[in-house]
Image (tube, rainbow, N blue to C red):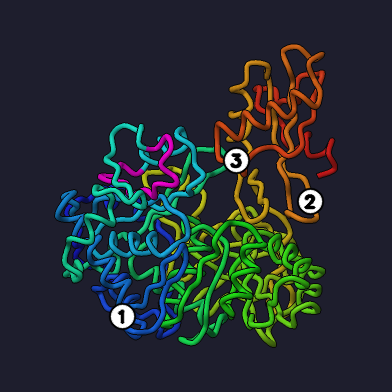
Amino acid sequence: MSQSRSAHIDTFCQDGMPPEDQLPDLIFTIPEVDYPERLNAATELLASGEGGRPCVSGGGVTWTYSDLDAWSARIANVLVGEHDIVPGNRVVLRGGNNPWTVACWLAVLRAGAVVVTTIPLLRKGEMEEVLDKSRPSLALCETTFAAEMTELEDVTWQLWGDGSDSSLEAIAATKPDSFDDVDTAADDIALIALTSGTTGAPKAPMHFHRDLLAIADTFGKILKAGPDDVFTGSPPLAFTFGLGGVVVFPMRVGASTVYPAAPGPEALARIIDEAGCTVCFTAPTAYRAMLGMTDRFDLSSLRRAVSAGEILGKANFDAFKEATGVELIDGIGATEMLHIFISASDEDIRPGATGLPVPGFEAKVTGDDGEEVPDGEVGRLAVRGPVGCRYLNDERQATYVQDGWNLTGDAYIRDSDGYFWYQARTDDMIISSGYNIASPEVEQALLGHPEVVEAGVIGVPDPDRGQVVKAFVHLRDPSMAGDTLARELQDHVKETIAPYKYPRIVEFSEEPLPKTLTGKLQRFALRGSSGA
């Protein structure tokens, strides 16, 4: 598929593309991903559903496809008319899972701009990194999550949800309910989905308009959803797992989505019961938790339940099937690949295995030399398909993409039948309840406390969360070690970075932490001492 003429006036993203020899090989092996040279993903998604059918519901708002079309058009008119947004500008989006956030997301794409999704829990310092990386022209923020954010410099904020005359919804209500969507190229950048690497510095994978359709048209063959399905899920829209599961996938088939009223498994179980949801996206942790709620909530409406973000495990699969009759669809994806690329459903499921390459993708297990290892041996997972990794201005591109293949950082075994079995992460990311947490980022937060001299962070196994964050701390005054200071350090981390990253276990060390001859922290030694 050749490069099309870009509609972007602001060429920041194109200028930040990786060198040609570091781009992933893209393959288009199924007809569903043979897209025209020009398309706007928002236009395509809104056109997938019948106008009068339900589309999105939550937070006291229920919209049909026509309603969402109208409101996203009004917001696009605000972006262009009030904030002078031009194609290629970046627009930061900070909001919860609700219809207004979806409308904003679509509006940015309709205006030909690039949406930069962020987790609402990010603190001011983390948001400064986002702004520095993406250089946005505007940020749209739900009032609920506006604390600290409006103090950030170098970006204009437009709030919604406060009911004032200056709110986004008030201004949008005065605008036309139609918009001439920008004629973007299929390979214009639509989305920057920020993540964090092992250094803690944010990485910024960029994805095309056609990529947003490709994840639905490939994984859709596994999901097998239709317009009568009712979707729900807990992952934030800022996570590409959530973006696919509760925005792109349902809209692509003309289905509806109901968003839980609050985070957590209980709110998810309640909405499944109340709304009769048929498709659910969440992490294994939540599925385990909902098993203990079946006496209070009826989950029998579910026919599809997709699990990703951490290892599922056969025990969890068996327990959920016994309690509900539903076989969990396991899957592995990556922000760099936008969504799931190995999975299985129905008769193809093998409990404990992640599955087979999703139609349209290829996968292999390689050694450090890049050559495939024999079936049954552990190696590095390499993937390619109609989407791939394109980091914005980041030398780590050369590590993630090698010889055209995307190296996900996961260790896998492939069996003789072609099934892939997850073994471990190959880097220092901690995956807890589906959240990716970078060890160095938590270490830096701990080091900001005046009593901490050294900090080392690892992930340790946990039956409920997959992993939890454990911190080893060497103090200026070792006599201060104890439960009181441990709680103080945990609170300090929660106030410095997103609260879900805090160490649930704090172990004090009287001796300096183990280091290499060059002074680098030896996390493998910490893992060894914890049996992790």
Label 2 vs label 3, nearer the camera: 3
372 over 65 or under it: above or below: above
Residue matched to label 1: 47
**Mark 3 closeness class: few <14, some 14–19, many ≥20 residues within 10 Å:** some
Occupied quadrant, residue 356: bottom right
> Magenta segment range?
134-149
Task: List x then y, in percent, for residue 346.
Answer: 67, 85
Residue at 69% x, 82% y: name it. 300
Q: Which amino acid is tagged 3?
A: Pro
The CA distance from mark 1 to mark 3 is 38 Å
- Where disc 2 sits, the SS reads strand
Q: Which amino acid is tagged 2?
A: Asp
| Viewer-side residue, 342 vs 501 | 501
Residue matched to label 2: 462
Task: List x then y, in percent, for residue 460.
Answer: 77, 45
The CA distance from mark 2 to mark 3 is 18 Å
Q: Are marks 1 and 3 in contact (CB under 8 Å)?
A: no
Residue at 65% x, 31% y: name it. 491
**Mark 2 closeness class: few <14, some 14–19, many ≥20 residues within 10 Å:** few
Residue matched to label 3: 499
Task: List x then y, in percent, for residue 152.
Answer: 35, 33
Is residue 526 found left or right of 163 in the rendered image? right
Q: Which amino acid is tagged 1?
A: Ala
